[in-house]
Image (cartoon, helix red, strand yellow):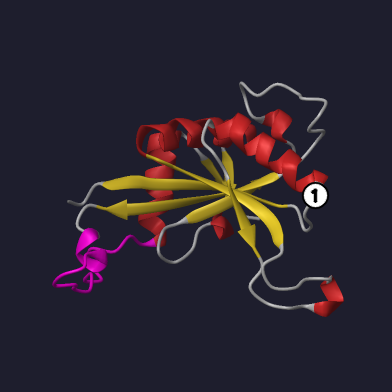
Amino acid sequence: MEDIVVEKVTLNIGAGEAGDKLEKAVKLLEKISGAKPVKTKTMKRIPTWGLRPNLTIGVKVTSRGKKAEALLKRLLQAKDNKLKLRSFDKEGNFSFGIEEYLLIPGVEYDVSIGVIGLEAAVTLYRRGYRVKRRRIMKKNIPSRHKIKKDEAIEFVKSHFGVDMEEK
């Protein structure tokens, strides 16, 4: 029950506008993950940015299980197996950005896509977290069972061979 596991890896590209840029992002995420991406919509109106509710401006895809771990290894290779300490939150999850998808091993350059960057968010968990999410008899997770930042860093170092940078 104390083992830490990768629950999911979420890839995200914020295109900022609907149209050609968004379609390129959909194509890229499908190429990287092998899964069908979901388009994200705005919730608020922000006139200075030209945003209104239900405007499609981003794309995301979530990968779980063994596929998520394999994808995470490839994404970390694109970052030269280095992460910053501030990439981790207090609950052990972490995220990082990749400037160009060309850095990811196994992904070839596509002229129709061009050069686009993306963000990856990794969620870690321990078995037993289902108690918090189940429908009947929900309970809180005790603090001793939650993943702490130090434990997450140690997990990433040992399982993925990642080095930590101060800045």
Depth check: give the residue in front, 111 or 100: 111
Q: Is residue 84 above or below residue 37?
A: below
Q: Is residue 143 visible?
A: yes
Residue extending farthest to the front is 54
Residue under label 1: 19
At x 38%, y 36%, the residue is 159
Q: Magenta stretch containing residue 142, yes or no?
A: yes
- Tag 1 secondary structure: loop
In this view, the residue in front, 139 or 142, is: 139
Q: Residue at x 68, y 55 (%)?
A: 58
Residue drawn at (56%, 36%) of the image: 76
Residue 50 image position (x, y, % from top left): 84, 71
Residue 25 appears at what percent x and percent y? Answer: 71, 42
Q: Which residues are magenta?
A: 130-148
Q: Quadrant of residue 65?
A: top left
Q: Is residue 98 located in the magenta-colored stretch of the structure?
A: no
Q: Is residue 165 visible?
A: no
Whether 95 is drawn above or below 108: the answer is below
